[in-house]
């Protein structure tokens, strides 16, 4: 039986190289993000205030499974899904990039750093996902996002804290639910594939 | 000259206990039309994937032996060099589309192998006429029917003018009319293009009409490789390997056996019809 | 009887089967999008952005876009308006003047705050409509040709194309799964919101499994067509047939030059002359005069 941490451990003689398949998976994952993000935005039409936006789960899980490839996909897909769903115009979407990038890499970094299992097998795995993949990621994402809204004048400066809290709580709940489903049910399949990244690029 | 030479090829997918290919040795001459038959999980797809170089490039596993295309080891060739030599059409037409329109899909492969834009234009025109897809150029792949998709997939490979074209169960996901269209295209490839064609196909009736030679793959090994006309002479052996022998061929064998005809029986429908009519008229 | 325009499906929506916009080179359309997608940011005066919105609607109509399809964006546009107005109502800005339009309990609707909210709202709608216009008049391949003509490397434009393609694949698979569920009698409309969320989450399991297989298929498809992501073939630049085929015409060049010149003029008048500030806006001054006689 695989012990915790072995998911990230290279087997003896195992060679993993980044290749075409990773590039394709990055695009496919971004495409999935576009659909999930667009549907999420249209289903809960709060516009640029992305509360209850399930796309954040795609971002966290993407970097856990696909390392840096998932991270890149995670900050690109919101730009496209925002334009398609009409939830944020291009300049606002571009300004969101640092927040989306943070949301897209923290979980992946934490899982590798603390050797957590993407299949959420132990309490430690759950805690790392919840703390890093949800709470820390969303604090940074919501913090940056609400700052962007204030910067563009889309919210009154006095509403900054309220919007931040609403954004953080709403997104955290949606991304936790979706993230847990994805990790618990799909990770066992993903970790057997060639595109699963034990390191950051392969 | 041999288009393909395979020597002692063994391939085992990662995580599997038994190899998919167990010591394959095979030589295929240039400009032959080869049919590959065999039951499911026999190793047919693995065999053609190894010829194309998809194995070992795209899968993890253990690979031993050599595959040479026109004398060159395929593991020493880049994807681009391989694409110039051998093209492959897959069973699922959706799986092979990588572009946003038919025109782009066909030109994509040509761009990859470095055709200049004028040549791409000429080849597009030629291949669209050949495969009868002229009206589809502007369409996105998801707007096409299954048969149209497969014709586009075949066109995109023919346009690259490789010396070898492999088609892996090209009709398995198509309706009967689309299947016929694909077989019509295969006939065009055989009659009009100077190519080595390898077709993996379950529809033996149709395949025998076109193939110069047949390969029977079973349990990771080549059980039989020979000229199509004599391939079914030992029907019991073929049937033992879980191949559904066409009724017309079985019938002809029975008729010939009852008439104590020692020589091999005809296998193509037209020939069978002619022979049976002859028998009915009293010819020997 | 009103003639129904024929529409063509794209991965990201619908576009007219025929449109005068298609006479323009994709890069001219892309530059138009970049300009219309940025210029409202320089404009605070609501009347100019309203004019901008009217122009976009005129362009949508002129381009044969089926306007009824814009209905899906309505909930978003309404809630965005509500959110902006609520935040500026409960957290007003520039209250020093004390110009109050109305009050609800202890909360006052301050004139400047209200006008600012309106200015921002109209601006955001203008920006959104610019996006909608672009995606309603461009096929995926037009977007890619636009990118390539602007000099984006092959790998970038191909990556973008593959994202759109995979979004399409994902949606096709999603539709198949939904049809299968409906065939078994499940009506998602009857589910509670929580049920819908749970249901949506559970869709992802088969969809991801399919995507993993598709990834393998597409990778093999790319490999078998000799794809190398370097953007070079035998040391030379990778040929680009579509870009070669879609050549920039003189009209396109004139249009691009006009868009750039107009954009620079807007930026100049905003940054140097301050023509588009809210305080200088005709509507702002008129309403201020009408309501407060100032």
Image (cartoon, coloured by chain):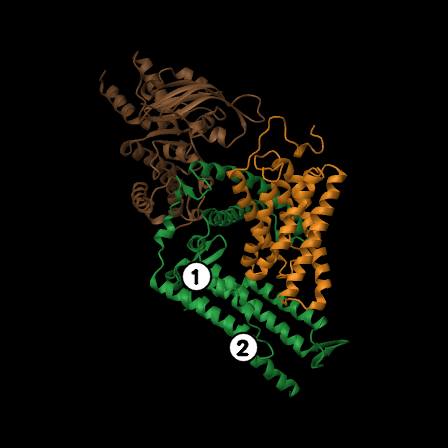
Chain colours: A orange, B brown, C green
Query: In the figure, is residue A66 to the left or right of B194?
Result: right
Q: Chain of mark 2?
A: C
For label 2, the residue is C275
To which quarter of the image does residue C46 belong? bottom right
Residue drawn at 67 percent across, 61 percent down: A146
- Residue B156 drawn at (x, y percent): 37, 40
To which quarter of the image does residue B247 belong? top left
Residue nearer the viewer, A67 or B135: A67
Is residue C99 visible in the rendered image? The answer is yes
Is residue B242 visible in the rendered image? The answer is no
- Residue A78 drawn at (x, y percent): 58, 54
Q: Up-down: is B75 above or below C160?
A: above
- Residue A52 drawn at (x, y percent): 67, 55
Q: Chain of mark 1?
A: C
Labelled disc at residue C94: none
Residue drawn at 62 percent across, 86 percent down: C290
Residue drawn at 60 percent across, 63 percent down: C76
Which residue is most to the bottom? C293
Residue nearer the viewer, B46 or A97: A97
- Residue C134 drawn at (x, y percent): 47, 61
Circle 1: element type? helix
Tell me the CA gap for discs 1 and 2.
27 Å
Pointer 2 local density, CA inside 10 Å: few below 14, some 14–19, many at least 20: some
Circle 2: element type? loop
Q: Locate the C terminus of chain B by quadrant.
A: top left
Pointer 1 local density, CA inside 10 Å: few below 14, some 14–19, many at least 20: many
Q: Locate the N terminus of chain B by quadrant.
A: top left
Query: Is label 1 in contact with label 2 (beta carbons under 8 Å)?
Result: no
Q: Up-down: is C224 above or below C146?
A: above
Query: In the figure, is residue C182 to the left or right of C92?
Result: left
For label 1, the residue is C29
């Amino acid at each position: 039986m695989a012990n915790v941490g072995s998911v990230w451990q290279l087997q003896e003689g195992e060679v993993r190289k980044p290749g075409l398949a990773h590039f394709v998976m990055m695009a496919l994952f971004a495409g999935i993000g576009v659909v999930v993000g667009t549907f999420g935005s249209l289903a809960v039409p709060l516009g640029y205030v992305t509360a209850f936006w399930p796309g954040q789960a795609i971002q966290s899980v993407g970097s856990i499974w696909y390392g840096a490839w998932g991270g890149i996909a995670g900050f690109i897909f919101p730009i496209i899904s925002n334009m398609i769903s009409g939830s944020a115009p291009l300049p606002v979407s571009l300004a969101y990039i640092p927040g989306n990038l943070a949301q897209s890499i923290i979980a992946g970094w934490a899982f590798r750093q603390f050797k957590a299992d993407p299949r959420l097998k132990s309490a430690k795995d759950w805690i790392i996902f919840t703390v890093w993949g949800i709470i820390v990621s969303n604090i940074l994402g919501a913090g940056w996002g609400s700052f962007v809204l204030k910067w563009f004048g889309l919210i009154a400066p006095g509403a900054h804290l309220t919007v931040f809290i609403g954004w953080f709580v709403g997104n955290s709940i949606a991304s936790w639910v979706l993230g847990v489903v994805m990790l618990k049910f799909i990770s066992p399949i993903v970790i057997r594939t060639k595109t699963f990244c034990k390191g950051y690029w392969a | 000259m041999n288009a393909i030479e395979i020597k002692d090829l063994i391939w085992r997918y990662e995580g599997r206990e038994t190899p998919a290919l167990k010591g394959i040795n095979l030589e295929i001459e240039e400009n032959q039309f080869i049919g590959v038959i065999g039951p499911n999980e026999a190793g047919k797809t693995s065999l053609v994937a190894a010829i194309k170089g998809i194995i070992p490039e795209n899968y993890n596993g253990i690979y031993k032996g050599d595959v040479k295309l026109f004398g060159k080891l395929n593991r020493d060739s880049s994807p681009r060099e391989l694409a110039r030599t051998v093209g492959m059409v897959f069973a699922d037409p959706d799986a092979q589309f990588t572009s946003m329109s038919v025109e782009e899909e066909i030109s994509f492969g040509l761009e990859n192998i470095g055709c200049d834009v004028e040549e791409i234009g000429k080849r597009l025109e030629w291949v669209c006429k050949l495969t009868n897809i002229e009206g589809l150029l502007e369409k996105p792949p998801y707007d096409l029917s299954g048969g149209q998709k497969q014709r586009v997939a075949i066109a995109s490979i023919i346009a690259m003018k490789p010396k070898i074209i492999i088609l892996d169960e090209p009709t398995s996901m198509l309706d009967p009319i689309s299947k016929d269209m694909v077989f019509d295209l295969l006939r065009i490839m055989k009659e009009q293009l100077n190519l080595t064609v390898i077709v993996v196909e379950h529809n033996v009736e149709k395949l025998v009409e076109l193939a110069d030679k047949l390969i029977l793959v079973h349990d990771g090994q080549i059980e039989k490789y020979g000229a199509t006309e004599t391939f079914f002479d030992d029907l019991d052996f073929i049937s033992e390997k879980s191949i559904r022998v066409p009724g017309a061929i079985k019938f002809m064998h029975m008729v010939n056996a009852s008439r104590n005809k020692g020589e091999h029986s005809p296998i193509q429908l037209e020939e069978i019809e002619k022979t049976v009519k002859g028998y009915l008229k009293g010819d020997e | 009887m009103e003639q129904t325009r024929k529409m063509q499906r794209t991965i990201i929506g619908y576009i007219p089967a025929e449109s005068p916009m298609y006479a323009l080179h994709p890069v001219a359309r892309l530059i138009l999008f970049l300009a219309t997608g940025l210029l409202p940011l320089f404009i605070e005066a609501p009347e100019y952005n309203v004019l901008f919105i009217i122009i976009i609607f005129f362009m949508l109509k002129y381009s044969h876009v089926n306007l009824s399809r814009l209905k899906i964006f309505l909930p978003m546009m309404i809630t965005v308006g509500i959110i902006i107005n609520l935040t500026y109502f409960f957290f007003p800005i520039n209250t020093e003047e004390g110009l109050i339009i109305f009050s609800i309990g202890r909360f006052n609707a301050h004139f400047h705050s209200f006008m600012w909210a309106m200015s921002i709202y109209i601006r955001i709608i203008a920006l959104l409509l610019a996006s909608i216009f672009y995606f309603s008049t461009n096929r995926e391949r037009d977007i890619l040709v636009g990118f390539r003509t602007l000099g984006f490397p092959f790998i970038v434009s191909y990556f973008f194309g593959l994202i759109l393609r995979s979004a399409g694949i994902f949606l096709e698979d999603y539709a198949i799964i939904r049809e299968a569920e409906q065939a078994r009698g499940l009506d998602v409309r009857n589910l509670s919101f929580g049920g819908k969320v749970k249901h949506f989450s559970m869709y992802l399991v088969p969809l991801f499994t399919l995507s993993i297989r598709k990834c393998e298929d597409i990778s093999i498809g790319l490999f078998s067509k000799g794809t190398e992501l370097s953007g070079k073939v035998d040391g030379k630049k990778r040929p680009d047939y579509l870009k070669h085929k879609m050549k920039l015409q003189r009209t396109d060049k004139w249009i691009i030059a006009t868009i750039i010149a107009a954009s620079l003029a807007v930026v100049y008048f905003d940054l140097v002359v301050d023509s588009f500030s809210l305080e200088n806006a005709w509507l702002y001054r008129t309403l201020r005069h009408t309501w407060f006689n100032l």
